[in-house]
Structures are given as structure tokens and as C-alpha cells.
Image (cartoon, rainbow, N blue to C red):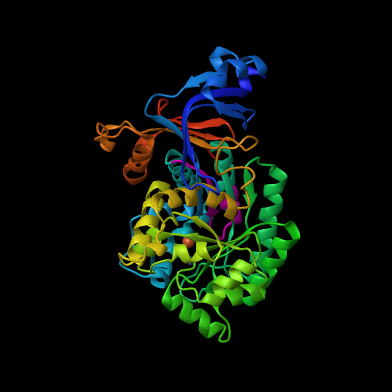
């Protein structure tokens, strides 16, 4: 193996498999070559591995006693264009919040300079917080969405990036014509493809049924099919929203509306899905679409309590997301904690069968997310042949104290889950490349539009 492309980590790692939500492996060796995991073995095998792969001492990184590698977080629902609004407007519910708070901010992205500053701030913050892969909603502006792509690429994150589409909006002047929306979506896709970003995939993004005409939804479904691309949208989030959709499409459930437009594919990510009748769960399962639970946002906007276990029991692919800025926290640690918290509340203190515990929430934030994005062969856990998207986490920080009484990794991991944050994340790797390091402040690349 060549040295510049190889790193060998010696220490412990924790990840999820489909059989085991939390698997902690101690005294291991993980070899990373050209961004991919080349081998995973017990530490005793090191001398053999050194010979077999012609490894050099200086490629080896020994993890500290309280350090551990975990897979990078996969945030399946995030609006970086709303980053500046985190913590604002939560005295409103969804539809008022969109019109009074969200659309006025998103409208500002017609200015590329504004977009560059906002997206740099947002993406570097998400990376510092351990999000190695994200599904992003930008705004209706193609050029600003391309600025977001350049920034994500420069910083080195993996992402699905969507130009938001909406041709109906009576309450605020933030929309496109149907024709513009379709043409600009194709321009966006073609430009992204021409630029050959290594880790960015365009995602077709009708905002939701209220803000998109039938013609637009059908046209976008056609574009997604033509380019074989993923789709993301919002569904069954808020009671007033659902009533409005019912008025627009009287004889259909929300999922049936999307299905009739051709928008429910095995590459579709549906945000929220709180109030879903059984036939919607069945239809989503049949279409093999994925659902993204956004618990922090659902709490702030009083949208409601999502039934994660019901989705899992039905075999629906499930992920979790921050939903910035309906959600106010940029951290997937927070999204995982809210997932267990909401599950505890839904269980009503008694129904064990309804629980999603911290191990399951960790799986949703990593492997579950990778599956919803169709990337489960590439990322989501540590497996030979997968890309090395990982966080080097240090749990021996004073704010996680006391650790004195904790002497095994299951408890230490539980502490990390419940009280961890970005201060615990020492280094962030995507495709084997270190894209953020706490030891090198400011290491997260910043993008300048003039470059
Ligand atoms: N539904 C339509 N647009 C949005 C949005 O930006 N955020 C959330 N949470 N729900 C939506
Ligand atoms: Fe959203």
C-alpha cells in the first residue's frame, strides 16, 4: 500500500449492524486505503497485517483510552438556507412559521453573496458537529444552490443537494412559475453533473403538496425518473397542513397524492410523516420510500409526536434529521436524544413495545440514514469495502463527567449518547479524508466565492 493514501487506526470502534443496533469492538485495527476500509481485524493481527500490506509505522494512529471511532452522522433532512433562523419563530406553527419566518429568509438567497456567507457558516457548523452526510433543501434559486454545492464540495462533506421547487404561494412573494421551476431544476441537475463533484448528488425537491401544482409535481417526478435521481419532500407534518391538502385533493390521503403524481419511489425521502393513516404507511412501504423523523422540529413547531416504532415494525426505511431550522439544534446527538425522548413519551410510560432506545436511535442516525439515501453499500457503518466516513470521538471531557465510576464501553457510549456534543468530536473523516480537526482550529475549509 502507498503511504499517502493509507491510515491504520488502532483502538476501539462502535457502530450498528442490521443485527445489532450497538456493537462495540475493542482492541481493533482498521486500515483505510484510498478512502475505503481495507481491513478490520483484531489488534493481535497487527504484525501479520504490517507484513501483508507492507504497512509503515508512521501510518499508524493509536487511539487514546477514552477515544473511539463511530460512523459519521447521516442527517436526512436539513435546510441549510434556514440556518440563520435557528431558535426563532417557535411561537408559531408550521404554516404561519413558513410565511412569516422562513420564506422571507429563503428569499434573500437570490443574492449569491448572502448565500455564500450563510451556507459556509451552516455547512462548516454541521461538519464540526459530526454530520458527514446530509440531505439538503436549499432555496428556489438555482445559482445559490450551486454555491451550496461548491461549498459542500470544498469542505468535503457528502451530500444530496436540492433546489427547492414551489409554484404556489399566495401568502408571500416567494415562488417560481411552473415552467421556471422545471427548467431550473434541469439546469441545476445538468450543472451539478457537469461539475463532477465526487460526493454530491442532486435531489429533486418539491417543497410540499401545498406549494406545488399538480403539473409541477408530475413534471418533477418525470425529471427524477429521467435522471434516476432521489426525491425529497414533506408529508403529514401538521394538522392544518393536512387539512389544506385534503381540501386540494379531497379523495386522497397525503401519500396517495404524492403517489398519484409519481413522487413515491424507492429513492424518495419523506420528511416528518407524523399523522399517517395506516394506508399511508402501507403505501410508503410498498413503494419502498423512506421516512425521515425530525423530532426537534416537531417539538418546536408543536407539529406532534412521531411513532418511530410503528414505522420500524411496518418495515419502512427510517432515518432521522435535524430539520434546521424547524429544528433548532445542528447536532445529530440532539436529534438522536430527541428520538429516544419522543419515543419515551409516545410509549406513555408503559408500552415497552413502542420504545426506540438509544442504541436504535444511534442506528437510525448512521446506518438507517444511509439506507434511506440508498447509500447502505457505501457508508453507515464500518465494513471492509465501505467508505471511511467516521468521527474520532473523545469521551473523557470534563463536561461528560463523572467518568470515574464508568469502566466499560457500553456505559461510556451511553454517556456519549446522552451528554455528548461537538466538543467530544476530535476529528471528522469523509471518504478517508480528515475534513475537520479540533486540534487544528479553523481546519474546516471555508469557501470563498471569489476563489
Ligand atoms: N413544509 C414545507 N416546507 C417546510 C420547511 O421548510 N420546514 C418544515 N419543517 N416543514 C415544511
Ligand atoms: Fe423540513
How far from the left and from the top, in percent, is residue 11?
A: 46, 26
Horizontal and vertical percent position of residue 322: 44, 54
Which residue is outermost to the right?
226
Q: Nearer the viewer, residue 448 or 191?
A: 191
Q: Is residue 228 visible?
A: yes
Image vertical order of residue 211 relative to residue 332, above or below: below
Give the residue drawn at x 38%, y 58%. 296
Instruction: Look at the image and say whether residue 174 sits in the magenta stretch.
Output: no
Instruction: Name the quadrant of the N terminus.
Output: top right
User: Is 234 on the left or on the right of 334, as rendered?
Assistant: right
Which image quarter is the C terminus in? top right
Q: Residue 88, located in which quarter of the rendered image?
A: bottom left
Answer above or below: position of 403 versus 169. above
Side (left or right) of 74 relative to 264: left
Residue in the foreground of this view, choosing between 363 and 448? 363
**Taking 246 as reference, is 265 above or below it?**
above
Using residue 331 as the reference point, say whether residue 287 is left or right of it. Answer: right
> Would you say 160 lies left or right of 295 here?
right
Instruction: Tell me which segment is drawn in magenta.
Output: 130-147
Amino acid at each position: 500500500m502507498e503511504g499517502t493514501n493509507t491510515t491504520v487506526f488502532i483502538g476501539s470502534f462502535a457502530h450498528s449492524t442490521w443485527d445489532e443496533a450497538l456493537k462495540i469492538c475493542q482492541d481493533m485495527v482498521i486500515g483505510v486505503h484510498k478512502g475505503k476500509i481495507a481491513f478490520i481485524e483484531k489488534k493481535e493481527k497487527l504484525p501479520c497485517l504490517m507484513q501483508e500490506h507492507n504497512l509503515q509505522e508512521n501510518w499508524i494512529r493509536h487511539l487514546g483510552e477514552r477515544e473511539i471511532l463511530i460512523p459519521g452522522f447521516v442527517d436526512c433532512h436539513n435546510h441549510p438556507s434556514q440556518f440563520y433562523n435557528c431558535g426563532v419563530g417557535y411561537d408559531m406553527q408550521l404554516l404561519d412559521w413558513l410565511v412569516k419566518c422562513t420564506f422571507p429568509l429563503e428569499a434573500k438567497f437570490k443574492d449569491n453573496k448572502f448565500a455564500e456567507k450563510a451556507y459556509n457558516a451552516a455547512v462548516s457548523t454541521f461538519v464540526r458537529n459530526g454530520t458527514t452526510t446530509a440531505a439538503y433543501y436549499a432555496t428556489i434559486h438555482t445559482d445559490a444552490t450551486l454555491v451550496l454545492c461548491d461549498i459542500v464540495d470544498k469542505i468535503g462533506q457528502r451530500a444530496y443537494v436540492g433546489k427547492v421547487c414551489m409554484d404556489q404561494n399566495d401568502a408571500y412573494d416567494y415562488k417560481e412559475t411552473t415552467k421556471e421551476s422545471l427548467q431550473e431544476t434541469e439546469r441545476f441537475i445538468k450543472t451539478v453533473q457537469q461539475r463532477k463533484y465526487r460526493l454530491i448528488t442532486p435531489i429533486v425537491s418539491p417543497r410540499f403538496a401545498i406549494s406545488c401544482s399538480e403539473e409541477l409535481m408530475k413534471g418533477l417526478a418525470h425529471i427524477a425518473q429521467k435522471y434516476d435521481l432521489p426525491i425529497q419532500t414533506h408529508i403529514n407534518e401538521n394538522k392544518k397542513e393536512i387539512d389544506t391538502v385534503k381540501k386540494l385533493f379531497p379523495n386522497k390521503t397525503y401519500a396517495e397524492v404524492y403517489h398519484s403524481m409519481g413522487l413515491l419511489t424507492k429513492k424518495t425521502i419523506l420528511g416528518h410523516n407524523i399523522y399517517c393513516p395506516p394506508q399511508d404507511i402501507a403505501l410508503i412501504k410498498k413503494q419502498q420510500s423512506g421516512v425521515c423523523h425530525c423530532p426537534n422540529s416537531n417539538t418546536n413547531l408543536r407539529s406532534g409526536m412521531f411513532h418511530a416504532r410503528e414505522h420500524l415494525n411496518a418495515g419502512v426505511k427510517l432515518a432521522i434529521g435535524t430539520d434546521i431550522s424547524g429544528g433548532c439544534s445542528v447536532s445529530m446527538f440532539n436529534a438522536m436524544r430527541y428520538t429516544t425522548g419522543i419515543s419515551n413519551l409516545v410509549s406513555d410510560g408503559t408500552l415497552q413495545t413502542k420504545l426506540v432506545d438509544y442504541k436504535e436511535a444511534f442506528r437510525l442516525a448512521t446506518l438507517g440514514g444511509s439506507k434511506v439515501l440508498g447509500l447502505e453499500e457505501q457508508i453507515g457503518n464500518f465494513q471492509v469495502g465501505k467508505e471511511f466516513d467516521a468521527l474520532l470521538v473523545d469521551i473523557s471531557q470534563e463536561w461528560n463527567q463523572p467518568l470515574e465510576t464508568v469502566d466499560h464501553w457500553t456505559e461510556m457510549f451511553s454517556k456519549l449518547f446522552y451528554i455528548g456534543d461537538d466538543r467530544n468530536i476530535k476529528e471528522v473523516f469523509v471518504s478517508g479524508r480528515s475534513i475537520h480537526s479540533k486540534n487544528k482550529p479553523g481546519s474546516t475549509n471555508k469557501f470563498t466565492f471569489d476563489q
